[in-house]
Amino acid sequence: MTISTRTLLLAALAIAGASAAACQEEKAPLAPAATELKAPEAKAPAAATFAIDRAGSKVELMMDAPKEKIRGRIEGSAEGTLQVDPSDITRTTGLITVDISPLELLQTGVGDDGKPGEEKKSDLQNEHARTWLEISTDTPPDVREKNAKAQFAIKSISTSGEKDLSKLSGPERSITVTASGDLLLHQRQTPKTVELVATFRYEGDRPASVAVRTVKPFAVGLAEHDVRPREAFGKLAQKTLEVLSPKVAKEAMVSLEFTATAGAMAPASAAAPAK
């Protein structure tokens, strides 16, 4: 059987095109590299420092794909400080650091009828997640320590409500704000805007603490933070995010809540290595 030069050329072009498409998918635009965010300077000389209570903090994430829903949680791992001017809440700045190494994932499969099954924890899936995030045990300790640190630097605050807490009344005073700043995940930095509710607890005429929670989850893209299918440290898997998209969503919807106390010093920010 004779194969013409034209046929061989077309076949070669087809293979090259498929390879280029796969390569392009794996090389989706990455966010700028960074290893750590710095706490923004306080915008008010008289700003009060609020230190986050690590033990009571909680981070949750949802990844909603057609065939599988993944829920994640990280408890007792957030720390940092907020610099708050009670007379003008829009002058607030801060830095929140979360150790993601205690991440726990739970999965819910979706049947052919579209109905979700029972939520379960898969040890294998949790191992895969740590490999994707490069916080698995085969990751060099220095790299694992950097990748285990997720941060949100609050650079500016806006609100359509009252800015001066003294003009509100009662022992608890709530205000909805939009916090804008930078998110650091997997050593990649992206701008992020998050809607928050802050409830200040007053003792006399001064705020003693503040409870903060997200009004709605904010999206974090996996590809831009280089969180991709990996078989081991430094080795990408053959299956890409695009191929796995029926079972793994391309972004995580993240929620956060914590309480911070006025006048306390925050512990040094250091992510614990994954176990």
Image (cartoon, rainbow, N blue to C red):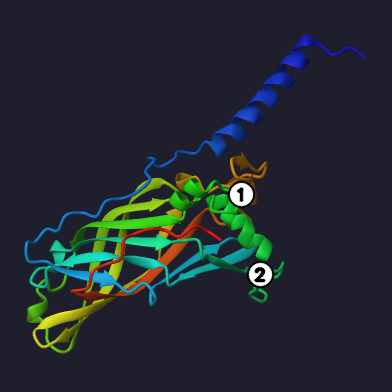
Q: Is residue 234 left or right of residue 149?
A: right
Q: Could you tell me which residue is drawn at 27 percent across and 51 percent down?
A: 38
| Tag 2 residue | 114
Farthest right residue in view? 1
Quarter where residue 84 is shown: bottom left
Tell me where residue 259 appears, x and y as whole percent: 30, 76
- Label 2: how many Cα within 10 Å (few below 14, some 14–19, many 20+): few
Q: Is residue 240 left or right of residue 196?
A: right
Q: Are marks 2 and 1 in contact (CB under 8 Å)?
A: no
Q: Give the amino acid type for the residue marked by disc 1 in the picture.
A: Asp
Q: Can you say whether 134 is above or below 116 in the image?
A: above
Which numbered dot is residue 138? 1
Quarter of the image with the C terminus is bottom right
Most extreme residue toward the top, as rendered? Answer: 5
In the image, is 254 to the left or to the right of 208?
A: right
Q: From this view, report whether residue 98 is shown above or below residue 205.
A: above
Marks 2, 1: nearer the viewer: 1
Q: Which mark is residue 253?
A: none
Residue shown at 24%/55% (left/top)?
A: 39
| Sequence-wise first label, 2 or 1 | 2
What amino acid type should be assigned to the residue bearing mark 2?
A: Gly
**Left or right: 105 as drawn, with respect to 40:** right
Q: Which image quarter: residue 175?
A: bottom left
Q: Secondary structure at mark 1?
A: loop
Secondary structure under tag 2 reads: loop
Where does the image place residue 206, in percent across and percent down from the top left? Answer: 11, 81
Q: List x then y, in percent, for residue 71.
A: 54, 68
Q: Is residue 172 above or below residue 236?
A: below
